[in-house]
Image (cartoon, rainbow, N blue to C red):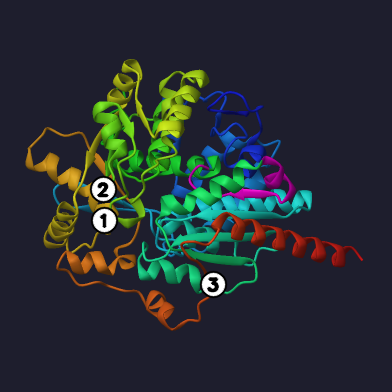
Amino acid sequence: MWYVSTRGIAPRVNFEGALFSGYAPDGGLFMPEELPQLDRETLCQWSTLSYPDLVKELCALFIGSELIPKDDLNDLIDQAFSRFRHKEVVRLSRLKNGLNVLELWHGVTYAFKDLSLSCTAQFLQYFLEKREKHVTVVVGTSGDTGSAAIESVKGAKNVDIIVLLPKGHCTKIQELQMTTVLKENVHVFGAEGNSDELDEPIKTVFADVAFVKKHNLMSLNSINWSRVLVQMAHHFLAYFQCTPSLDTHPLPLVEVVVPTGAAGNLAAGYIAQKIGLPIRLVVAVNRNDIIHRTVQQGDFSLSKAVKSTLASAMDIQVPYNMERVFWLLSGSDSQVTRALMEQFERTQSVNLPKELHSKLSEVVTSESVSDEAITQTMGRCWDENQYLLCPHSAVAVNYHYQQMDRQQPSTPRCCLAPASAAKFPEAVLAAGLTPETPAEIVALEHKETRCTLMQRGDNWTLMLQDTIEDLSRRWRGHALNASQ
């Protein structure tokens, strides 16, 4: 299985190359050169599999046994999910009025990113140990990625991780989940800016190809192919749990409602659809609505500023993974994709070509949800089911309630729930409900914290480069001592 850049200039790489790169050297994102096609028989066989077994099947398909033999792959995935609180790893809650909520948040940090990052970290360490190499992972976070990435690699001997978090823009719990991990290989910075602003120094550092190579830098943000690959399993499980039957011809459709910021789960769903899963995708965003505007009007352009919302992990203006969706829609046309993305990077505004826009609106429905609708949805779900939704899950469930209230004849529908309400007590209170906080989250309040401040006016890029150089020196010292 080979991977090519959406922009068509970088040489192709195997899964290991895509895993360690993040962005391709030409600024694009890696995608499989060819997508396998799953027939009806395979789908029927997979329909009884657990979530971890679906991940194993998908990874085997897209990694290749010459890189990770099947037995090793299965062990890595079992190891990845060993710390999850629920034996099924991912669980479907069937609630009143046809509401299906797929709980993706039973990992250590109570968010869906634990699923893909725990696997990605296992793959990383597998290759690093084989090659006796060290990497420094650099992650910008809007809230959940940072803590999930830290948990997946903390204490690993071949990995250092640097996380930049937007001070005051994530919830208190999210921040504490990062700043209370005092392992030697974890380095947390709190930047006085929003998540788009702290992506700038990260992009600058990664644009220096020689520096990236010298220091073995990589990113674990949702641009990393390995994360998108694992996230495809959400869609398969959603389909198999919610389809009324697998006996009809053609197979019945299931609608999957994807709440998103950077569009990683959307890209994963669209690839799942392309390889043969009969799902219809609905993308649900908060008031940061670039994806909604793109689907509705073909208007892929930045707003003047990021709006702060109750669904804070989706307060993102640049949905990086839309590049993967555009590339697939254009029939893997890297020239079209490159022109589009380079124009967007230059002017921060693109009108999609007519043909591309009409294809997009055929495969995706979208909605944008206000804070008021989020709290109303959280309240209604509690009243009807005594079930607490996090604000991001409420963005998806809001769509379900709208369809119900219009009494649309509906296909079965599954709403992805990316995080536990326990992480967002502020939003639960705003909905007039009572937060339920697990003991391990309460305990964070009393732990020692460690975080380096990046103030406005500081040179963030320089601070990042200095930290990376320091970690490289330290690793070389360790390696030298070990060999003596």
Return the residue nearer the eye: 345 or 51.
345
Q: Are marks 2 and 1 in contact (CB under 8 Å)?
A: yes
Residue 49 sits inside the magenta stretch: no
Q: CA distance from mark 3 to mark 2?
A: 30 Å
Q: Is residue 112 visible?
A: no
- Badge 3: residue crowd in 10 Å (few <14, some 14–19, many ≥20): many
Residue 152, image x, y percentages: 56, 60
Q: Secondary structure at mark 3?
A: loop
Return the residue nearer the eye: 404 or 88.
404
Q: Are marks 3 and 2 in contact (CB under 8 Å)?
A: no
Residue 216 sits inside the magenta stretch: yes
Rendered residue at 28%/30% (across/down): 295
Residue 354, image x, y percentages: 31, 17
Three-letter code, disc 1: Thr
Residue wearing tag 1: 309
Q: Secondary structure at mark 1?
A: loop
Looking at the rendering, which quadrant does residue 399 occupy?
top left
Three-letter code, disc 2: Asn
Which numbered dot is residue 286? 2
Which numbered dot is residue 28? none
Q: Residue furthest top?
A: 355
Q: Residue furthest front?
A: 457
Q: CA distance from mark 1 to mark 3?
A: 27 Å
- Badge 2: residue crowd in 10 Å (few <14, some 14–19, many ≥20): many
Rendered residue at 68%/42% (across/down): 68
Q: Secondary structure at mark 2?
A: loop
> Which image quarter is the C terminus in?
bottom right
Which numbered dot is residue 181? 3
Q: Residue furthest left?
A: 406
Q: Which residues are magenta?
A: 209-223
